[in-house]
Image: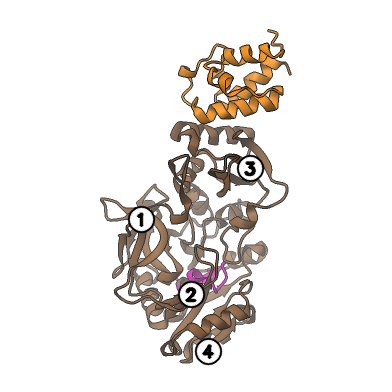
């Protein structure tokens, strides 16, 4: 298995096209992975020799923040791209504009593999760090598909508030909370687009469920499983899956762990089935904790925040003065006093005090990871945070 | 800002009241957010606002905004209408 650097693909994707055609397996190393070559060398040494051909590797930080090398099967990825093409009614789509790093499982499978399998054009950009470049790509887009993460919506709204891009036919969201409350913005920007919520995880390589935006008002409703995908709850409520498209294994902190056909793999999310056959997320496994004996789901609290605040928001964990686990609400950009009051009113109306955040803070904007997700760790330590409200405990 | 105004602001903030809900004769029974954590928060707020930290017994005896005024008045804090 050899290493292909995303940095080498910035100007020309030909090396990736060639790597996909060659039988040898490869790893696509992110531009800014933070993963040492030493760790990667060790991880590659753990991958069984039978995966040396017809596979590929991607890196993810996973739910633990520690690097994880995920090994996928090219045949499975191609099958998934074909299934998504059918379910997402993608036949009229002629091109896909890349606003996320290619080494992100979402962009790699939903866009690059899809474009390769279905012989569509992939239009690379430098992402929203280069809004002018993105605008140019979107303005000239014809029958195009986008893959976005929810955190990009406020930035799109900021940069292109008075624009619309009718050349975009499909807009997909994945990799975080579906921006149900900002669909008006998405529809304004992309008036001809069907909007989909895609759910999955890197180990699923990466899709498990799908729904059209208008099929639910609930941002936590992730829709129904893809054909062939089975979902169930683990003993602790974690959403587990079996998928014919999933990764074949991974290397994390320990040796290579195969994900066999009979193994139920964890998503790291808590979820419950609904009577209509869809699944509803109720939080991340690690985002549910107890505070003074009360169970707290930060996902549930975020739903309350979203009712009063339409910009960026996240929770980070912090202990209070008594040493009890707590959480801080961080917003971006700074809210008005009226908006803070509206958020607090939502907490008062819906949650016992023990569930309220220790503080409400703001920063100008959230730092993003290369994959477009919010860098929660950095955000929680940014200097110059403004405190708008705090509990005196 | 007078001490009454400071107290009003503190109580509104601790209990997440709408300003229109506030009264100086407001009692615990009338405030849905008045719980044990609120009492701790109120005590810490009294300390940071008025410089006196109610003893546990005093904190336990707070059943209304008037009780806060009573405790602080006994410590020399003046609340002039």
- What is the drawing colour of chain A? brown
Real-space Cα distance between discs 1 and 4? 44 Å
Question: Against A377, is A261 above or below?
Answer: below
| Mark found first going from the N terminus, 2 or 1 | 1
Mark 3 falls within which chain? Answer: A
Return the residue at label 2: A254
The answer to whether the residues at label 1 and label 4 have Cβ atoms under 8 Å apart is: no
User: What range of the chain is rendered magenta?
Assistant: A92-109
Question: Against A128, is A182 above or below?
Answer: above
Mark 4 falls within which chain? Answer: A
| Mark found first going from the N terminus, 3 or 2 | 2
In the image, residue A356 lies at what x, y percent? 52, 38
Which label sits on residue A361? 3
Real-space Cα distance between discs 4 and 2? 31 Å
> Magenta stretch: residue A136 in it?
no
| Mark found first going from the N terminus, 4 or 2 | 4
Q: Nearer the viewer, mark 4 or mark 3?
A: 3
Same chain for labels 4 and 3? Say yes or no. yes
- What is the drawing colour of chain B? orange
| Mark found first going from the N terminus, 4 or 3 | 4
Same chain for labels 4 and 2? Say yes or no. yes
The answer to whether the residues at label 4 and label 3 have Cβ atoms under 8 Å apart is: no
Return the residue at label 1: A236
Return the residue at label 4: A18
Most distant residue in the top direction: B81
- In terms of depth relative to the viewer, which is nearer, A293 or A108? A293
Classify mark 3: helix, strand or loop.
strand
* Quarter occupied by residue A262: bottom left
């Amino acid at each position: 298995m050899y290493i292909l650097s995303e940095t080498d693909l910035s100007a020309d994707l030909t090396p990736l096209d060639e790597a996909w055609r060659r039988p040898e397996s490869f790893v696509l190393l992110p531009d800014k992975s933070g993963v040492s070559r030493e760790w990667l060398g060790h991880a590659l040494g753990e991958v069984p020799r039978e995966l040396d051909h017809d596979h590929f590797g991607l890196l993810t930080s996973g739910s633990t923040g520690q690097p994880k090398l995920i090994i996928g099967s090219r045949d499975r990825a191609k099958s998934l791209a074909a299934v998504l093409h059918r379910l997402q009614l993608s036949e009229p789509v002629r091109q896909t504009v890349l606003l996320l790093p290619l080494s992100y499982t979402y962009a790699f499978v939903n866009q690059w593999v899809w474009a390769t399998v279905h012989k569509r054009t992939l239009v690379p950009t430098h992402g929203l760090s280069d809004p002018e470049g993105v605008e140019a790509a979107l303005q000239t887009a014809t029958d195009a598909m986008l893959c976005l993460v929810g955190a990009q919506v406020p930035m799109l709204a900021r940069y292109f508030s008075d624009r619309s891009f009718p050349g975009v036919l499909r807009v997909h969201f994945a990799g975080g909370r579906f921006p149900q409350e900002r669909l008006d913005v998405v529809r304004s920007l992309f008036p001809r687009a069907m909007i989909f919520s895609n759910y999955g995880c890197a180990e699923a390589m990466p899709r498990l469920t799908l729904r059209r935006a208008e099929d639910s008002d609930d941002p936590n409703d992730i829709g129904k499983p893809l054909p062939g995908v089975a979902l169930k709850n683990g003993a602790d409520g974690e959403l587990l899956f079996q998928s014919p498209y999933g990764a074949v294994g991974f290397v994390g902190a320990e040796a290579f762990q195969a994900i066999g056909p009979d193994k139920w793999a964890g998503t790291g999310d808590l979820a419950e089935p609904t009577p209509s056959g869809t699944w509803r997320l109720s939080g991340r496994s690690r985002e549910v904790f107890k505070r003074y004996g009360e169970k707290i789901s930060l996902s549930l609290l975020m739903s309350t925040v979203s009712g009063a605040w339409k910009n960026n928001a996240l929770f980070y964990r912090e202990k209070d003065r008594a040493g009890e686990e707590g959480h801080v609400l961080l917003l971006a950009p700074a809210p008005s006093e009226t908006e803070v009051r509206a958020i607090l009113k939502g907490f008062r109306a819906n949650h016992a005090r023990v569930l309220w955040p220790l503080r409400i803070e703001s920063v100008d904007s959230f730092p993003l990871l290369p994959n477009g997700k919010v860098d929660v760790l950095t955000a929680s330590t940014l200097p110059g945070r403004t405190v708008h409200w705090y509990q005196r405990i | 800002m007078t001490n009454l105004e400071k107290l009003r602001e503190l109580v509104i903030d601790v209990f997440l009241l709408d300003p229109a809900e506030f009264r100086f004769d407001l009692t615990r029974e009338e405030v849905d957010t008045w719980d044990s954590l609120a009492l701790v928060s109120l005590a810490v707020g009294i300390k940071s606002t008025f410089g006196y930290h109610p003893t546990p017994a005093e904190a336990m005896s707070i059943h209304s905004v008037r009780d806060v005024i009573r405790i602080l008045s006994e410590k020399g804090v003046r609340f002039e209408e």
